[in-house]
Amino acid sequence: MPIASPPSRDNVPLSGSQRRSTALIRRRSAAATIQTRRTNTMSEGYPADRTALLIVDPYNDFMSEGGKLYEAIRPTAEASGMFGNLRKLIPAIRNLGMQVIIVPHHRACDHDHLGWQHINAFIQKGEPLRAFEAGSWGGEFHEEFGPKPGDVIVKEHWAQSGFANTDLDLQLKQHGIQKIILVGLIANSCIESTARYGMELGYHVTLVPDATAAFSPEGMVAAATNAPMFAHAILKTDDLLAQLPKESR
């Protein structure tokens, strides 16, 4: 059953601190984008048959009003323009025939971590919330941003990296993918961890800061600060769209 949607806040003005946080996120993102543009001239271009779009954690609990984590990510999603940019980027990728891969987090179940020897504080703190609970509306994929026919849905990751303990690397190799573009949630958690792992495995990694969000403005700043250490390209949605092939395969 869907959780009741909270009242809309679209017309509520941002506070001074929210405006400052939004401006900081945009400045950091712009600086990282400029830096990677200068160093990425040898690896430009996204061949349709060798590029995949990874949509990370497109669950209702994150992306739908009434989801358990929607309000937590909403301020940074609005600041980055995530939802609007996903609505531009995902259809463009599909229209080009590029592979779309869904990278989902583990869906909460009873006794998930029973007997575990090492549960980190973040997982432990989140247990009572039961985000993305199996069998619940929040644990279903978002209708617009979730999988469509032809997409690959990889095995669920337990923590942050979409590669760890899943078949993501296998699926990418079997589909001949060399370049991965990451969008979705969370910028300084699952996006960053998956991107770092992908770089270590030899994939060309592209981040799209205005197609992601975090639990706080500080999380977005952390993601923007760390990104140049592992990403091959950091592009705004419109800049990425301009570099995509002009014809479908």
Image (cartoon, rainbow, N blue to C red):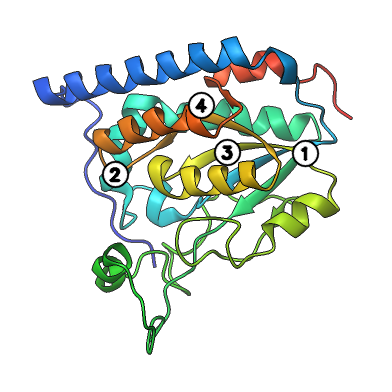
Left/right placement of residue 49 relative to residue 213 reads: right
* Circle 1 or circle 4, nearest the eye: 1
Q: Nearer the viewer, residue 38 or 54?
A: 38
Q: Quadrant of residue 204?
A: top right
Circle 4/circle 3 CB separation < 8 Å: no
Q: Which residue is mark 2?
A: 215
User: Disc 1 or 2, which lies upstream in sequence?
Assistant: 1
User: What's under tag 1, amino acid-wise?
Assistant: Gln
| Image x and y of residue 209, in percent | 46, 28
Left/right placement of residue 168 relative to residue 50 reads: left
* Circle 3 or circle 1, nearest the eye: 1
User: What's under tag 4, amino acid-wise?
Assistant: Asn
Circle 1/circle 4 CB separation < 8 Å: no
Q: Quadrant of residue 120?
A: bottom left
User: What's under tag 2, amino acid-wise?
Assistant: Phe
* Circle 2 or circle 4, nearest the eye: 2
User: Disc 4 or 3, which lies upstream in sequence?
Assistant: 4
User: Disc 2 or 4, which lies upstream in sequence?
Assistant: 4
Residue found at x 84% / y 49%: 175
Circle 3/circle 1 CB separation < 8 Å: no
Mark identifier at residue 182:
3
Cα distance in 3D space between marks 1 and 4: 23 Å
Residue found at x 42% / y 46%: 63
Q: Secondary structure at mark 4?
A: helix
Circle 1/circle 2 CB separation < 8 Å: no
Residue found at x 46% / y 56%: 160
Q: Which residue is mark 1?
A: 178
Q: Secondary structure at mark 2?
A: loop
